[in-house]
Amino acid sequence: MHYHISVPDPQSRFLRITYTIPEIQSDHIEIQLPSWRPGRYEIQNFAKNIQFIEAISAAGHKLPIHKVTKDRWQVGTSGEKEVQIRYSYFASIQNAGSSYVDEELWYLNFINFCMYTEGRISEPYTVALELPDGYQIACGLPAAGMNVLAARDFYQLVDSPLLASESLQKCEYHVRGVHFKIWMHGNLKPNWRRIERDFRRFSREQIAMMQEFPENDYHFLNLILPNAFYHGVEHQNSTMIVLGPDDEGEGLYSDLLGVSSHELFHTWNIIRIRPAELLPYDFTKENYFRTCFVAEGCTTYYGDLFLRRAGVLNEEAYVKELQVYMKRHFESSAHAAQSLTDSSFDLWLDGYEKGIPNRKVSVYHKGALVSLILDLYLRKKTNHAKSLDDVMRLLWVRFGKPFVGYTLEDYISIVEEVAGGEIGWYWQECIFSAEPLENRLNEALAFVGLQMSVFSNGNVQLNIHDDFKAKLQRDKWLGTLQVLTVEEEEE
Ligand SMILES: [Zn+2]
């Protein structure tokens, strides 16, 4: 399977795409453009950006092609062994899941515009890019020649976004044998010394906790815009991040750290530790699942926790981040009718819009708060001998590493194995119902000397108590797993 992509007129924003399908053995084939993209669990409309499409034989004859669903076509092959699908795609959107081209940049998410042939999704794909001279490519896919990339299957192809331009900036570092690259496109002068130091710290901390990294290389792909923006999407061995505005120094930097640490942890949690309902991805329709509070909730909780443990955030800054999740939860969904499992299922319905009042909860914010409750419960019960870290490691060893999906029941059973017994109250109050969270949260926080006050407008104040015993517990909870020597830092 082969793709050829060119941009004859960058100002027009159109990609010109040729999809070559070899070794055809039937008189018709069906080709499918994904109807959603991993990381965003709602139906998309990528096909509306296709301006024209045609099917051509090797000799250049037109073949019959017609739509059978909004993003699936049937092609009559007339006995041809090889068929080319030629089409144009309007690439004009700059968010972390879209595609965009202009005179200076190619930003591609192959999921937006690459199709697979039914029954042949697991075959290898190559992509040749007709790039302008001097362009550098940033992408998680391995190179297979000059401006040619190779994917072992369609899943890898569409899980590997790409930035290419003449003015990409880059910084590299190694942690535990993993080669990390941070790429930036935009109008800014990155402080690479500081970025490398902080990224190295949280990468080390994450790998120290999980004990191994699923990939040999990893790419942080950053598109920095002049306007305000905050969006990141996780991928197999990369993440696509769009941030702005480019003139906002410290605010932009703290967003960059927060989103990068979150997305890196997804390399384990959801990319590999995958809900069974999403393995393999079915790109033709909704893939309902109830465990997004694990995939996004635990990841949101750990994103900032790793920054604190790695010493990138101080205790005060970390507590402020916690206060932000609490505020977001209590302001908008403290009285919501749905449970976390209901809202996870309904992501496909209205998960990424405001929605009607008091209906859903955020799998990110409430998900992070119930992760916090569980972590502190396990730590208190076992005097820090066990924690949510053990749950994540067991999920990795049993489900992520062998790459078999986990079910909600699997998660419950691993948590209770770590807890050393049933914790019905947790599932009932925090996960399966819409019970208020305030008392359980304060019960958990008291162990580490924190006290949360929720005001009637949903505003939240999180205070640290000056208590010696609680401070010790807090240090164990927020303490690093890694003691970095100067030499290791300079590695
Ligand atoms: Zn996420």
Image (cartoon, rainbow, N blue to C red):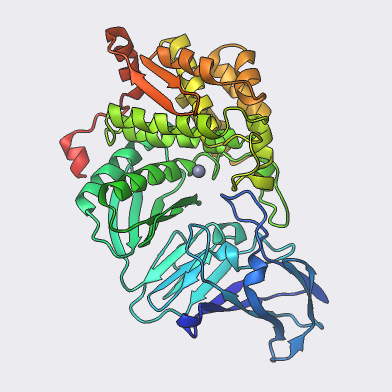
Q: Position of residue 467 (x, y in %)?
A: 29, 9
The image quadrant that residue 83 belongs to is bottom right
Please state which of residues 392 and 328 is positioned toward the viewer in this rendering. 328
Q: How many marks?
A: 0
Q: Position of residue 398 (x, y in %)?
A: 57, 32
Does 224 sit left or right of 432 as displayed?
A: left
Classify 188 as above or below 62. Answer: above
Q: Quadrant of the N terminus?
A: bottom right
The image quadrant that residue 432 belongs to is top right
Q: Quadrant of the C terminus?
A: top left
Classify 77 as above or below 121. Answer: below
Does 193 sit left or right of 413 as displayed?
A: left
Does 31 sit left or right of 405 as displayed?
A: right
> Residue placed farthest to the left in the image?
486
Q: Residue at x 37, y 75 (%)?
A: 104
Classify 390 as above or below 303. Answer: above
Q: Position of residue 437 (x, y in %)?
A: 55, 21
Classify 430 as above or below 288. Answer: above
Answer yes or no: is residue 118 visible: yes
The image quadrant that residue 185 belongs to is bottom left
Q: Position of residue 204 (x, y in %)?
A: 32, 38
Q: Residue at x 70, y 43 (%)?
A: 288
Please state which of residues 79 and 167 is positioned toward the viewer in this rendering. 167
Q: Residue at x 62, y 19 (%)?
A: 429
Answer yes or no: is residue 177 visible: no
Please state which of residues 488 and 185 is positioned toward the viewer in this rendering. 185
